[in-house]
Amino acid sequence: MNAYYGTNSGKVRNNNEDNLIVYEYGNYYLCVVADGMGGHKAGEIASNLTVETIKNYFVSRIQKGSFKPPKFIMEAASLANKTVYEQSIIKEDYNGMGTTVTMAVIDKSEKIAYIGNVGDSRTYLINKERISQITDDHTYVQELVKKGEITDLEAKHHSERNIITRAIGSQDEVDVDIFEIEIDDEDTLLLCSDGLTTHINDNDIFEYINKFGANCVDKLISLANENGGTDNITVIIINTSDRGETDDR
């Protein structure tokens, strides 16, 4: 199993409010992308608190035994939400802060990936044939799409496309979506913040990964910046084969 990752502030923003973690412990891989929001660097605080809380809880739960990924994802998201929410109340500068989060817990022996999601950071499953978005965006425009009031294309350019309907830390409780997918040696998982998907469509992501291999994080970040770079960009790519080990083709 190979993991590649990177983050970039983009071409417009002065600081990077995204955070990520890739962590292997025992039989499991943990990957997390968090995209913070809030003024006065509060978004950076929210995303950092979230990834650190999830990582620490991940280690503690495995050490205690009987680790169950779906339960872990639900509890970890709840704990991160509580941590961020309480800090937003205690410190005035952090008031209103929050973060998206998408995470994957990969059981290496069973070849199963458990995905958790809050907000509009995404997880994709990619193979040689197709790219599939596993997560659902928790946004205002996505709700309009589901209701049939606008098309996917209209959502892409909607003036309110950045309004998030769920976030870690925005309320005292949070709902997290959980998905379970089987993976094989030809599969690749991609976790990313919306700084990537705002500027690169799914087909281009699919083509880049199949052309350059899993180690094309820098190429994807560069392309997102070339196409506008209006937001922070964070990418994690994981595959379980040796396909695409170089970035020089």
Image: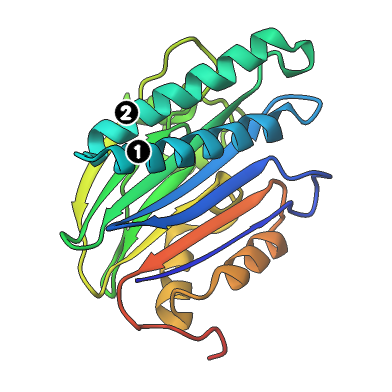
Q: In this rendering, is residue 92 above or below 80?
A: above
Three-letter residue code for mark 1: Gly
Disc number lying in front (2 or 1): 2
Residue 35, quarter of picture: top right
User: Can you see residue 123?
Assistant: yes
Residue bearing the label numbered 1: 116
**Nearer to us in this view, 185 or 127:** 185
**Nearer to us in this view, 67 or 217:** 67
Q: Residue at x 47, y 31 (%)?
A: 119
| Contact? badges 2 and 1 (CB < 8 Å) | yes
Q: How is the image coloured?
A: rainbow
**x and y percentages locating residue 136 in the rendered image:** 36, 37
Q: Is residue 172 left or right of residue 94?
A: left
Q: Is residue 96 left or right of residue 149?
A: right
**x and y percentages locating residue 51 in the rendered image:** 53, 39
**x and y percentages locating residue 249 in the rendered image:** 53, 91
Q: Which mark is residue 232?
A: none
Q: Is residue 77 left or right of residue 196?
A: left
Three-letter residue code for mark 2: Met
Residue 62, quarter of picture: top left
Sequence order check, earlier mark of 2 and 1: 2
Label 2 residue SS? helix
Q: In this rendering, is residue 71 above or below 126?
A: above
Q: Quadrant of the N terminus?
A: bottom left
Q: Residue at x 19, y 39 (%)?
A: 66
Label 1 residue SS? strand
Residue bearing the label numbered 2: 74
Please count the marks in the image: 2
